[in-house]
Image (cartoon, rainbow, N blue to C red):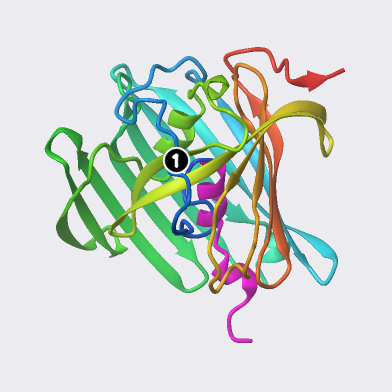
């Protein structure tokens, strides 16, 4: 096999999964005659009552192949308050012990409007094996446009303008927008939509709310009361038919993703909360 399962399943898919309401590890499943998603929140505006300047969250990434769990890498999320906007960054990398298999150095930076939590500028600087990508997108939300400067490097890009269908998120802004959603307004089993712009396309996405759960154990951190979600995916190079992904979020004011699990075509993957600091609220979801 010329490409490994993990090389197909890049760290960007874990970042998407941590977005909870994003496309997660694949594209949205299109099912005919299904009940449409419920739209309760305003997709163009939400108040931030969840995160603050200085918040840092780190996830450890695992890949399971032939019943052996491998510690593959980490993703660190950081928040910086810039006055009228937030700078959200994420750095994903593989461990040195894993890099004989596949090496990843991914940098993500998004600047989001404080009033709406919609992206203003999104930057991806990707190094995955021999693959390189630099993609800077300036969002003109009021005009329904996005301008992308995209190429192998920052010095070698082509500029192209895209039309947006309504208010649009990127790979990071969706994480922080949806953490602020009022999940108490949804009933168990309901689905809700979000839209993100990535890789030159807009994606309408659905996520199923699975309700509140109790006492989910997180390795080395203890047990937590959680809220569970299931993003829909479709079969392809990463997923088999009827694959189901599950995401557990802390049931407290912080709404932090704690655990993400999903099978893939070869083995399975998970992202587990490793550490946190600078949270706005006490981590009250933890069960003593």
In the shown orientation, is residue 72 left or right of residue 51? right
Could you tell me which quadrant the C terminus lies in? Answer: top right
**Residue 32, can we see it?**
yes
Residue at 70% from the left image edge and 38% from the top image edge = 273
Residue 61 magenta-highlighted: no
User: Which residue is nearer to you in this view: 48 or 82?
Assistant: 48
Residue at 47% from the left image edge and 19% from the top image edge = 53
Residue 229 vertical placement versus 118 (above, below): below
Start and end of the magenta stretch?
A: 1-19
Measured as percent of width and height from the top left, residue 159 is found at: 15, 58
Residue 12 magenta-highlighted: yes
Residue 219, picture quadrant? top right
Furthest toward the bottom, the residue is: 1
**Residue 102, can we see it?**
no
Residue 4, picture quadrant? bottom right
User: Which residue is nearer to you in this view: 259 or 137?
Assistant: 259
Measured as percent of width and height from the top left, residue 105 is found at: 52, 57
Decide whether the magenta segment is chiefly helix, strand or loop. helix
Measured as percent of width and height from the top left, residue 230 is found at: 61, 45
Residue at 30% from the left image edge and 19% from the top image edge = 115
Could you tell me which quadrant the N terminus lies in? Answer: bottom right
Furthest toward the front, the residue is: 33
> Element at badge 1?
loop
Residue at 48% from the left image edge and 51% from the top image edge = 34
Residue 56 vertical placement versus 164 (above, below): above
In the shown orientation, is residue 256 left or right of residue 37? right
Residue 139 vertical placement versus 224 (above, below): below
Q: Which residue, given by chain and number where applicable, does mark 1 sit on?
A: 37
In the shown orientation, is residue 201 left or right of residue 215? left
């Amino acid at each position: 096999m010329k490409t490994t399962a993990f090389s197909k399943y890049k760290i960007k898919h874990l970042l998407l999964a941590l977005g909870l309401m994003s496309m997660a590890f694949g594209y949205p499943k299109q099912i005919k005659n299904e009940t449409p998603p419920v739209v309760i929140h305003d997709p163009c505006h939400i108040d931030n009552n969840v995160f603050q300047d200085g918040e840092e969250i780190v996830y450890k990434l695992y890949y399971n192949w032939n019943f052996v769990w491998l510690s593959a890498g980490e993703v660190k999320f950081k928040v910086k308050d810039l006055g009228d906007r937030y700078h959200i960054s994420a750095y994903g990398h593989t461990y040195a012990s894993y890099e004989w298999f596949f090496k990843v150095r991914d940098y993500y930076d998004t600047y989001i409007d404080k009033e709406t939590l919609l992206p203003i500028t999104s930057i991806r600087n990707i190094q995955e094996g021999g693959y390189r990508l630099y993609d800077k997108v300036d969002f003109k939300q009021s005009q329904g446009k996005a301008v992308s400067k995209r190429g192998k490097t920052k010095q070698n890009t082509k500029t192209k303008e895209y039309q947006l269908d309504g208010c649009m998120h990127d790979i990071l802004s969706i994480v922080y927008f949806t953490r602020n959603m009022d999940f108490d307004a949804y009933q168990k089993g309901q689905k809700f939509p979000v839209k993100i712009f990535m890789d030159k396309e807009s994606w309408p996405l659905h996520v199923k709310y699975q309700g509140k759960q109790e006492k989910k154990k997180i390795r080395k951190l203890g047990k937590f009361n959680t809220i569970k979600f299931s993003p829909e995916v479709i079969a392809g190079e990463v997923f088999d038919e009827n694959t189901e992904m599950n995401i557990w979020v802390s049931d407290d004011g912080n709404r932090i993703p704690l655990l993400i699990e999903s099978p893939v075509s070869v083995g399975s993957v998970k992202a587990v909360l490793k550490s946190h600091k600078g949270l706005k609220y006490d981590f009250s979801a933890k069960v003593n």
